[in-house]
């Protein structure tokens, strides 16, 4: 804190017993640079010093154990790469082998035959004999048993640290020194009573002490919970402040009226009746864009819920109010598709729509850039090329980012800069994102949800089949084609440049051709190695029904819309992630015909892959799948959030600790409702703490 010397900011080498060499290791191996970093290193677990196991009691089920015994022998064995240090420790009941492969010379020097040691480590069996590799050793004396706290912390460590005598237990000597050094005023309370009290949270100082040296397991858990909560709470308060600041102070352009173009389109050209959810979302957006504040909104909806038409209507709203709009899509194919369908829908209306992608020809690009600045283009559709600096608008009022839930704060900031008054921003997700992820990565956004599919959709029937029955699957496709339907067959191509994947795709294509010979059948193929022209032509032929089968890679993953297609076959489905599978499946079931998704896999499946396929067969609900995906894979990265820290929780996990996150969210909102400026004396410490954090991230401005 300001004024006082912050002891926690001290470099780690200044801690008694550490020194420059060990400090170097701590920095390299565990990212510990300061006292604070060490304080925040949470033990993996605690071991009870008073509990010493006996060699006799070791069984194949034994995990970590602690043995007290005399070192009988130690010596080097093996040669070159097989070289190892082997020692024997003996207690009253038997002898156990200890093995080291690294740091051998150092360890050998430290060991004294005849000395009694306390040995700790994980038991493994080698040729039927129990042993511990890289155990942690300390000289055994009575004090080991009679420390104040009997629970000794074991910290995360690395082989390198262990081989330098800094295993998971030895680091405990450093934290012990540190904790002794710290006083309550070094770690002041930052949470107000109004938060601590109802949740019965442990005071901050006590929590840190007990995370390292708890009096009992229960206190240890309470201490950890307190710190996890704090982490979530601070993040939520910061998000809340950002949101609130935008609501209060940001200036946005005003879309005050629903005008002529919107109304004409709505009455004459809208191809279907909007669902209730679509109408509600448009209302939410209208309200938001009419206030004079800048809108930053996340639109969530499952695959096929009809986000595009919402985007189009909102764009018309912008145009009616004299502003330009842009729509950004993640791929060229999708950009092209949006452009085609939107120009088609708007063909009788006075709206000038243009498209800009990486493959736009130089001359056309020049023209587009010029007309954008002059304001004669109303509405620009494009890929990431839109974000580039030369793309300047006359008066951009609205930017929509489609099918891109991996679009973080930093990317949004690039859009804000495209106009003097930042444009309204609408980010539309490709599939739903889990609640907890929305709260953390997008906590600064307002959210709208389309929770209803257009009417007459029949649920997609999903099945899992082994590759051995591929010919039956092909017969099924034939039957569907006879009924006038179309089918996708997707091959994994994780990296478009991967040669093996490419060969697989080609083999697959030939195989499909053998089943479906011309001229009775026609096949389109799209993949990432084609030129955009070829890809677009092939896509277009499938769309118009010239071809009945589309063989492709995940380039068609998002957004592609061919309502007549009723079968989605995914080859090597075990190689895809859940959200990808769901997204691919979403290419069918877009019309009123019954649709099918067939997941083909090899017969050897690991548990996680099996689980994914099972979930896919069990549900069509993108919200449920998103939660499962998060459970199985963790949060991953969202562009631009890694640096900003939105998902960097040291202790808490948005998967395991989601309950705490929900509570933190609620408490943060309540606190900001009561005291939006953190002006009250009770929130002073919190405010100070946040201000100290400020500046560590570029996008946090706390007034
Ligand atoms: P997504 O939310 O996945 O982007 P789309 O906007 O591509 O979904 O819409 C999926 C399909 O549903 C499209 O063919 C679209 O024309 C159609 N659609 C959208 N809204 C409705 C509606 N209210 N009634 C009927 N069909 C609709
Ligand atoms: Mg879409």
Image (cartoon, helix red, strand yellow):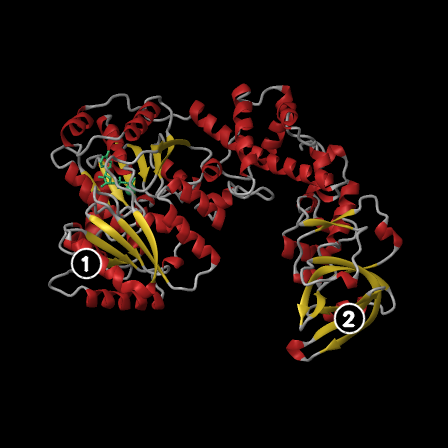
Q: Which mark is residue 478?
A: 1
- Estimate how packed mark 2 is, as few (under 14), some (14 to 19) or many (20 or more) residues with alpha carbons within 10 Å: many
Q: Residue 181, located in which quarter of the rendered image?
A: top right
| Residue drawn at x 75%, y 43% as measured from the top left | 213
- Residue occupying image coordinates x 66% and y 79%: 80
Q: Is residue 694 visible?
A: no
Q: Is residue 465 above or below residue 702?
A: below
Q: Residue at x 28, y 32 (%)?
A: 395
Tell me if label 1 and label 2 are in contact, CB under 8 Å. Answer: no
Residue 57 visible in this rendered orientation of the protein: yes
Q: Nearer the viewer, residue 611 or 543?
A: 611
Which corner quadrant of the figure contains ligand 2?
A: top left
In the image, which is nearer the foreground, mark 1 or mark 2?
Answer: 1
Camera-nearest residue between 52 and 11: 52
Point out which mark residue 601 bears.
Answer: none
Q: Is residue 63 above or below residue 300?
A: below
State whether label 2 is within 8 Å of ligand 1: no
Residue 299, horizontal then vertical, whole percent: 35, 35
Q: Quadrant of the N terminus?
A: top right
SS at badge 1: helix
Which residue has dot 2 on it? 87
Q: Is mark 1 within 8 Å of ligand 1?
A: no
* Disc 1/disc 2 C-alpha distance (Å): 69 Å
Q: Is residue 254 left or right of residue 545?
A: right
Q: Position of residue 155 (x, y in %)?
A: 69, 51
Nearer to the camera, 450 or 538: 450
Foreground pick, 44 / 390: 44
Residue 235 image position (x, y, % from top left): 54, 35
Crowding near pointer 1: few (<14 within 10 Å), some, many (20+)?
some
Left or right of 446? Residue 45 is right
Q: Is residue 541 left or right of residue 25?
A: left
């Amino acid at each position: 804190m300001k004024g006082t010397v912050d002891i926690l900011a001290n470099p780690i080498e200044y801690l008694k017993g550490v020194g420059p060499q060990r400090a170097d290791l701590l920095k390299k191996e565990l990212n510990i640079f300061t006292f604070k970093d060490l304080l925040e290193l949470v033990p993996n677990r605690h071991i009870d010093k008073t509990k010493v196991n006996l060699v006799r009691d070791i069984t194949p089920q034994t995990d970590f154990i602690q043995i007290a015994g005399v070192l009988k022998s130690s010596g080097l064995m093996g040669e070159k790469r097989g070289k190892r240090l082997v020692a024997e420790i003996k207690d009253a009941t038997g002898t156990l082998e200890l093995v080291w492969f690294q740091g051998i010379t150092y360890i050998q020097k430290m060991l004294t035959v005849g000395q009694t040691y306390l040995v700790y480590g994980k038991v493994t069996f080698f040729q039927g004999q129990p042993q511990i590799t890289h155990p942690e050793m300390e000289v055994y004396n009575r004090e080991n048993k009679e420390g104040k706290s009997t629970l000794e912390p074991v910290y995360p460590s690395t082989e390198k640290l262990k081989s330098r005598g800094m295993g998971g237990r030895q680091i405990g000597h450093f934290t012990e020194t540190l904790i002794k050094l710290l006083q309550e005023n070094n770690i002041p309370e930052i949470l107000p009573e109004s938060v601590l009290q109802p949740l019965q949270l442990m005071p901050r100082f006590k929590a840190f002490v007990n995370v390292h040296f708890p009096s009992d397991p229960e206190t240890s858990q309470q201490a950890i919970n307190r710190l996890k909560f704090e982490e979530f709470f601070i993040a939520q308060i910061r998000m809340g402040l950002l949101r609130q600041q935008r609501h209060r102070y940001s200036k946005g352009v005003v879309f005050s009226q629903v005008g002529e173009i919107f109304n004409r389109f709505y009455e004459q050209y809208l191809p279907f009746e909007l669902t209730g959810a679509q109408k509600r979302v448009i209302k939410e957006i209208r309200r938001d864009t009419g206030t004079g504040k800048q809108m930053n909104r996340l639109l969530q909806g499952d695959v096929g819920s009809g986000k595009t038409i919402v985007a189009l209507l909102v764009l018309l709203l912008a145009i009616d109010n004299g502003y330009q709009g842009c729509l950004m899509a993640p791929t060229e194919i999708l950009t092209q598709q949006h452009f085609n369908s939107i120009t088609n829908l708007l063909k009788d209306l006075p709206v000038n729509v243009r498209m800009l992608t990486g493959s736009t020809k130089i001359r056309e690009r020049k023209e587009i850039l010029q007309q954008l600045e002059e304001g004669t283009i109303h509405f620009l559709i494009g890929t990431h090329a839109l974000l580039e600096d030369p793309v300047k608008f006359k008066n951009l009022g609205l930017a929509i980012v489609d099918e891109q839930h991996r679009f973080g704060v930093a990317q949004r900031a690039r859009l804000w800069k495209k106009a003097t008054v930042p444009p309204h921003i609408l980010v539309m997700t490709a599939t739903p994102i889990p609640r907890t992820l929305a709260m953390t990565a997008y906590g600064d956004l307002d959210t709208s949800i389309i929770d209803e599919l257009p009417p007459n959709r029949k649920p997609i029937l999903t099945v899992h089949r082994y590759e051995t029955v591929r010919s039956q699957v092909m017969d099924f496709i034939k039957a569907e084609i006879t009924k006038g339907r179309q089918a996708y067959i997707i091959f994994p191509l994780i990296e478009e440049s991967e040669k093996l994947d490419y060969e697989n795709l080609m083999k697959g294509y030939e195989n499909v051709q053998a089943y479906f010979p011309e001229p009775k059948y026609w096949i389109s193929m799209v993949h990432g190695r084609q030129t955009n022209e070829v890809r677009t032509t092939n896509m277009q032929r499938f769309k118009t029904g010239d071809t009945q089968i589309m063989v492709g890679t995940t380039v068609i993953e998002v957004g592609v819309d061919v309502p007549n297609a009723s079968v989605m076959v995914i080859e090597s489905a075990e190689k895809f992630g859940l959200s990808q599978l769901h997204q691919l499946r979403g290419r069918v079931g877009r019309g009123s015909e019954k649709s099918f998704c067939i997941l083909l896999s090899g017969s050897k499946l690991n548990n996680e892959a099996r689980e994914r396929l099972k979930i896919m067969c069990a549900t069509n609900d993108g919200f449920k799948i998103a939660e499962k995906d998060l459970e199985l894979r963790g949060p991953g990265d969202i562009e631009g959030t890694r640096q900003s820290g939105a998902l960097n929780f040291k202790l808490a996990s948005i998967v395991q600790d989601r309950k705490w996150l929900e509570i933190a969210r609620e408490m943060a909102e309540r606190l900001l409702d009561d005291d939006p400026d953190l002006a009250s004396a009770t929130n002073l410490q919190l405010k100070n703490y946040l201000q100290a954090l400020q500046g560590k991230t570029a996008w946090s401005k706390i007034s």
